Amino acid sequence: MSARDDILRRVREALDGVSPAVAVPSAPRAPGRGDLADLFAERVADYRAIVTRCAAEEVERVVRDVLGPARAVVPPSLGLDVPGAVVDEGLTADELDVCDAVVTRARVGIAETGTIVLDHTDDQGRRAISLVPDLHVCVVDESQVVADVPDAIALLDPARPLTWVSGPSATSDIELDRVEGVHGPRTLHVVLVDPQL
């Protein structure tokens, strides 16, 4: 008998008669923090991202203002008129590389962490378009903002590709020098749509 077999035999003996059912504790919940949209906007800004709050009828104007002269790519079903934007119909890496910006929607926003989650449906596009351009403009409706990660997980389909974004792409070297835009957009601009405005 090998040492491995001996260890596994001893583990089996120790577990003999032990019930495999284990009660899983519920996820800890964040205490009430007031208005979720306000908390979300504050936390997103904490990550050096830019947040613009606007009414639904102002979204297209705000997006145009944010983009300025930037060449943008958009997903097929964005639902916004973005003048001069290229619709992603499977652009190559080289074609994406010449785009300065991307405009997408999000699946959910998480107030506690200031995170946006994309599940890459047609209004968000494939993962490549949200990672290659230097500026990511993401439209989030206040109704999509949830309190915390367990609330977000409950809304997400685990079979879909998920991209979790907490601020612009950033990394640090061994001397803790922060570098932005290495593995994703250098600038994140969240357009938070408020139905009350």
Image (spheres, rainbow, N blue to C red):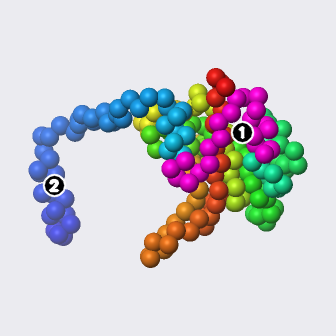
Quadrant hosting residue 53: top right
Q: Is residue 29 left or right of residue 196?
A: left
Q: Which mark is in front, 1 or 2?
A: 1
Three-letter amino acid code at disc 1?
A: Asp
Q: Position of residue 28 (x, y in %)?
A: 32, 36
Measured from the top left, where is residue 168 in percent x and y? Answer: 59, 56
| Rendered residue at 19%/59% (across/down) | 8
Of residues 84 and 178, the one drawn nearer to the viewer in this rendering: 178
- Do we see residue 73 in this rendering? no
What label does residue 123 carry, if any?
Answer: 1
Q: Which region is colored magenta?
A: 45-65
**The C terminus lies in quadrant:** top right
Taking the magenta stretch, the answer to whether it contains residue 52 is yes
Residue 33 vertical placement versus 119 (above, below): above
Name the residue type under label 2: Val
Q: Earlier in the sequence, mark 1 or mark 2?
A: 2
- Percent across and percent down for residue 49 are 59, 51
The residue wearing badge 2 is 11
